[in-house]
Amino acid sequence: MQTKESLKQEAQRILRANDRGGFTIPTAGLYPFQWLWDAGFTALGWMQFDERRAWEEFDRLFLGQWENGMLPHIVFHRPEPTYFPGPERWGVARTPPTSAITQPPVVATFVRWMLEQAQDQALAEAKARSLYPKILAYHRWFKRERDPANTGLITVLHPWETGADNSPAWDEALARVEVDPALPPYTRRDTAHVDPSQRPHQTEYDRFLTLLEVYKRAGFDQLGLLRECPFRVASLLIDCVLHRANRDLLWLSRRLGLGNEAEIEGWLKASQQGIESLWDEEAGLYFNRDLRTGEAIRVGVSASFLPLYAGTASPARAERLLRTLQDWAQQVRYLIPSTDPYSPRFEPQRYWRGPVWAVVNYLIALGFAEYGYPEMAERIRQDTLKLCEVTGFSEYFHPLTGQGLGGGAFSWTAAIYLAWGQAAGPVR
Ligand code: DGY
């Protein structure tokens, strides 16, 4: 095992090696462009040793923002043949080309944390001011185009938007997507980089790609897709991350004297109720919801704990979540498995069906700390650091053996090590 200091050097080296001149790729080969939520965690990593470079990550990310405010999940800054589906398949006529879906909207939260941590306050404030209207436009897009009826829950149109692509939570909803018989042929590239047993199944990929054709046929018209898209779910990853991001946007508004407070408070009121409507008393967990059937998706996933991070849970529900996670901990060596380890759908090495993800751990540990459970928060932090120390900066980890899985030399895992290795994290 390497020392903490040499690991820190190694984590910095990974970010530098993955730097493509202002934006950081998650890992070479498998993910050679800039991804939305990766960019947030990665910026926090850069912040620990190069503040100017950290802010640049967001400048580059917002080059991909659409005129309607949408922030796409991938910005294809330059051509790279090692990934599929690339810009040609998405067919978005923009410069730089982008995907046409979004991802957990972490940016406002990271801007707040970075502003709070910055040594160079003048730079941080200038950057926060310039980013603020762009983030506001993005959050308005969510409300206008993905929750026009003000239900307090965002409609998600693709498993990729949730970040947890092949979570068992999406199994039924995805199975209902009929594979397009005219689906243009394609070759997966992910399984050329990573052992297929650690990646989504082919049946899922056919549906992931079918959904792209649905969007293209709809001319990316969101309100039409809200009615017609064959995949429509409410995702705890999106709703909880957005709720916290709106809290942080409100904080930025006040701190920078920028107004819009009543508007953001209105969103928070709705999403508070929306998220809490996902609670399941019997299971002691929050569940995602299938918006085509209106039914709860009764499979526990790591995102089921995110209302702690959002801050919407009551103290009584937080206590139940603690007990549920303590129970999960009996089944695994490392927290937090991405799927309930008691579930028959738990697959400890397959992407979002079981493995531990450092970034999700960071958010949930923060939630436990804020609800007054420092021991659980510290347990999650120590498990995460140990996984990096024992097996390196992998994309995700086996919750029973600690084996590193997926892509190697992974930016957001290195970033979490840097951010979390220094201190217990932004707890307030
Ligand atoms: C992938 O290609 O695996 C990504 O998660 C989609 O963004």
Image (cartoon, helix red, strand yellow):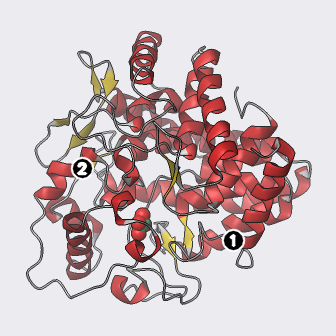
Which amino acid, by three-letter code, is at mark 1? Asn
Element assignment for label 2 = helix
Per the rendering, the mark at residue 416 is none
Residue 282 screen position, x and y as percent: 23, 15
Label 1 or label 2, whichever comes before in sequence order: 1
Q: Residues within 10 Å of mark 2 (few under 14, many from 20)?
A: many
Name the residue at 74% across, 30% down.
424
Side (left or right) of 142 relative to 409: left
Residue placed under numbered mark 2 in the picture: 170
Quarter of the render that holds ligand 1: bottom left
Name the residue at 40% across, 53% down.
351
Quarter of the image that includes the C terminus: top right
Up-down: is 340 above or below 27? above
Residue 131 screen position, x and y as percent: 68, 61
Side (left or right) of 155 relative to 85: left
Q: Is mark 2 within 8 Å of ligand 1?
A: no
Up-down: is 317 above or below 210? above
Q: Nearer the viewer, mark 1 or mark 2?
A: 1
Closer to the camera in the image, 346 or 278: 346
Residue placed under numbered mark 1 in the picture: 18
Which amino acid, by three-letter code, is at mark 2? Trp
Query: Real-space Cα distance between discs 1 and 2?
Result: 31 Å
Element assignment for label 1 = helix
Closer to the camera in the image, 84 or 354: 354
* Quadrant of residue 113 within the rendered picture: top right
Name the residue at 58% across, 55% down.
394
Query: Is there any visible trace of residue 140 in the rendered image?
Result: yes
Quarter of the image that includes the N terminus: top right
